[in-house]
Image (tube, coloured by chain):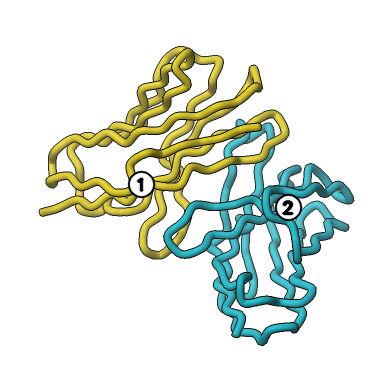
Chain colours: A yellow, B cyan
Amino acid sequence: AQTVTQSQPEMSVQEAETVTLSCTYDTSENNYYLFWYKQPPSRQMILVIRQEAYKQQNATENRFSVNFQKAAKSFSLKISDSQLGDTAMYFCASSSNTGKLIFGQGTTLQVKP
Amino acid sequence: DAGITQSPRYKITETGRQVTLMCHQTWSHSYMFWYRQDLGHGLRLIYYSAAADITDKGEVPDGYVVSRSKTENFPLTLESATRSQTSVYFCASSDTLSGNTIYFGEGSWLTVV
């Protein structure tokens, strides 16, 4: 069975600083995908970044990047130059060939001015 | 506009009543999903469908029924609503052509009194 664990319920960062959110996962699949989703107070689920497990290169999307450690089953999200609009809950998720997405418990990030 | 839409967005119902949440997507994605999110928690998979007329249980299927007679629609029915089913319900869709990325609707807020 797939599991995703986010061990940091809450984090805070000063505006313009860098913050890293942690995520570990477990899966028996050989081919899978990993995601970070952002959920602002509106509750809308917004895709932040996506990583294909067979690719060794870490995915990057503007200020967002991941540190994908396949052997350790770790998938952390780094947010550079944090902005007030980054304040949200962030979910790590894993999907398998069946297409199901399994979520972690979420990390609430507060960006302080 | 193309995308994934849910209706109703907000619903209050009484214990014991039947409620159906509608989901419609315009991308012709193969996979569709229903998740629930309880306050302060992550998303849990209720049911998913790999194609028309194919459905399967997720993590928390009890008390729910789904159908998929057409690719674009995936309604979720609470046969006899209970207070524990008060939650925000998210419909989602994906396709291998989208790299298994899952796209979410805006959510349906359901309160059972």
Q: Chain of mark 1?
A: A
Q: Is residue B44 left or right of residue B63?
A: left
Whether residues under marks 1 and 2 lie with C-beta atoms below 8 angstroms apart, the answer is no
For the point 56% across and 68% down, the residue is: B87
Q: Which residue is mark 2?
A: B47
Q: Chain of mark 2?
A: B
Q: Position of residue B104 (x, y in %)?
A: 57, 53
Distance of mark 1 from mark 2, alpha carbons? 25 Å
In this rendered view, identify the residue nearer to me: A87 or A75: A75
Name which quarter of the figure residue B83 lies in: bottom right
Disc number at residue A107?
1
Q: Position of residue B79 (x, y in %)?
A: 79, 73
Mark 2 surroundings: few (<14), some (14-19) or many (≥20) residues within 10 A: many
Q: Amino acid at mark 2?
A: Tyr
Above or below: residue A29 compared with residue B86: above
For the point 61% across and 31% down, the residue is: B99
Element on which disc 2 rests: strand
Q: Is residue B37 left or right of residue B22?
A: left
Q: Quadrant of the N terminus of chain B?
A: bottom right
Mark 1 surroundings: few (<14), some (14-19) or many (≥20) residues within 10 A: many
For the point 66% across and 87% down, the residue is: B14
In this rendered view, identify the residue nearer to me: A55 or B28: A55
Name which quarter of the figure residue B31 lies in: top right
Q: Amino acid at mark 1?
A: Thr
For the point 34% across and 47% down, the residue is: A9
Q: Quadrant of the C terminus of chain B?
A: bottom right
Please indicate, yes or no, whether residue B2 appears anywhere in the rendered image. Answer: no
Above or below: residue A51 compared with residue A44: above
Please indicate, yes or no, whether residue B63 appears anywhere in the rendered image. Answer: yes
Element on which disc 1 rests: strand
